[in-house]
Amino acid sequence: MSYTEFSYQLLQGYDFYYLNQKFDVTLQLGGSDQWGNITAGIEYNRKLRGPQLFGLTWPLLTRSDGKKFGKTEEGAVWLSSEKLSPYHFYQYLFRIPDADVIKLLKLLTFLPLEEIYAIESSMQEKGYEPNTAQKVLAEEVTRFVHGEEGLLQARRVTAGIAPGTDAKLTGKSLQALASEMPHASLAKDEVLGQKFVDLALKVGLIPSKSEGVRLIKNGGAYLNNERIDDPLFAITEMHFIDGIYLLLSSGKKKKILVQVEIDLKNNR
């Protein structure tokens, strides 16, 4: 256990006391996991003969795997579009497991319960299209948080860069999407001749080379929406879209746009 973890309750307790003394804060809100920290502040303030303080907590929103809703391997799911694009927000909701989607439809949307129950029933029927319920969840919550324009933006990116899609990728379309999805800029010599696995690792698409090889063998690696079958596959200039773009994908949901920086002085 680190010192930070060991002292967390003491520090947050003092923080509550300080906020009361400096800004007259008397109520602290938080998830149920913060109850001990909040009451520590209330008790600390009482012992210093300060005014009565209060705490208000509510149950954490958790998924079936026990993880907190809104936490990912990449970090927190922000409501602000400046910290997380509508596309990323939409994709997080679209990736919610079947075991959690109905619960979240009830808690996070304003859909009538009858409609949610109908969606739940359809999930058990033969011929149900996977992720239909997740799509409803993603659209409803993204519209509520980011508005109609944010939802349209998320849809546009999702449709335009889906691996295996028949949509033709162009430099113009990728340039328009660059600010709405993960992207990286690399010098041409950092890309040309590199194995797909090495490039994917460099830009953060995969956590390790072994994971990249496993991804390819499982049929989940894509370059410019085309599946990569060879672990030794290397990038050539013919793969550059309009001479400067590459779209790398892990599965159908995780993607990174690579922009190749051209050395105009040496014309390369």
Image: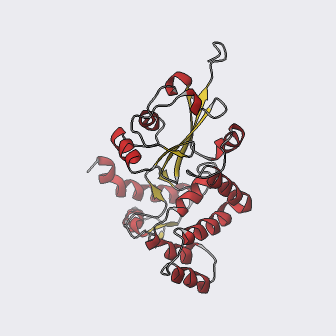
Q: Is residue 223 visible?
A: yes
Image location of residue 97, percent across then percent down: 45, 67
> Does 120 sit left or right of 208 as displayed?
right
> Does 75 sit left or right of 245 as displayed?
left
Image location of residue 174, percent across then percent down: 66, 41
Pick out the residue farthest to the bottom.
114
Image location of residue 81, percent across then percent down: 64, 52
Looking at the image, which residue is at 71% across and 58% down?
Answer: 152
Q: Is residue 58 visible?
A: no
- Which picture quadrant has residue 231? top left
Looking at the image, which residue is at 29% across and 47% down?
Answer: 3
Looking at the image, which residue is at 46% across and 31% down?
Answer: 234
- Residue 238 against residue 13 in the figure, above or below: above
- Residue 140 against residue 13 in the figure, above or below: below
> Does 261 sit left or right of 47 as displayed?
right
Q: Looking at the rendering, in which quadrant would you find the C terminus? A: top right
Image location of residue 201, percent across then percent down: 43, 37
Which of the pair 42/183 is nearer the observer? Answer: 183
Pick out the residue farthest to the top.
266
